[in-house]
Image: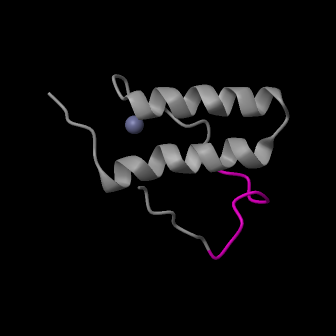
Amino acid sequence: MSPRQTFPESPVTLPDPTRPPRPTPGCDVCAALDQQRAEAEEEGNTRRATTLEMEMRQHHAMRPPKRR
Ligand SMILES: [Zn+2]
């Protein structure tokens, strides 16, 4: 089970200055999210793409990637 966070403000209407997101090399979650984001953008689904970008950042905020 994965807890879902809710946000007081909509990410949809705000242009995100941190775009484009950078998938962390070697991170399966990033790879999956980045692919879904690309698909969403192809469909013109900006809302979904933005959500996926946020997820890509947040999962590292909770669980940083290991570095060597
Ligand atoms: Zn990642």
Q: Magenta residues, as a range?
A: 8-16
Q: Does 30 appear above or below 60?
A: above
Q: Front-most of 13 and 31?
A: 31
Q: Position of residue 9 (x, y in %)?
A: 68, 72
Q: Dividing the image into 4 quarters, which one contains the N terminus?
A: bottom left
Residue at 33% x, 56% y: name it. 62
Q: Dividing the image into 4 quarters, which one contains the C terminus?
A: top left
Q: Count of labels shown?
A: 0
Q: Does 55 appear above or below 6?
A: above
Q: Position of residue 38 (x, y in %)?
A: 68, 27
Residue at 60% x, 25% y: name it. 35
In the displayed structure image, the side of residue 47 where residue 52 appears, left or right: left
In the displayed structure image, the side of residue 17 where residue 4 appears, left or right: left
Q: Residue 28 falls in which quadrant of the image?
A: top left
Residue at 51% x, 63% y: name it. 4
Residue at 61% x, 41% y: name it. 19
Q: Front-most of 22 and 48?
A: 48
Ligand 1 lies in quarter: top left
26 inside magenta stretch: no
Query: What color scheme is it?
Result: one colour
Q: Residue furthest bottom?
A: 8
- Main SS, magenta region, reads loop
Q: Does 46 appear above or below 27?
A: below
Q: Residue furthest left?
A: 68
In the displayed structure image, the side of residue 63 where residue 30 appears, left or right: right
In the displayed structure image, the side of residue 8 where residue 30 appears, left or right: left
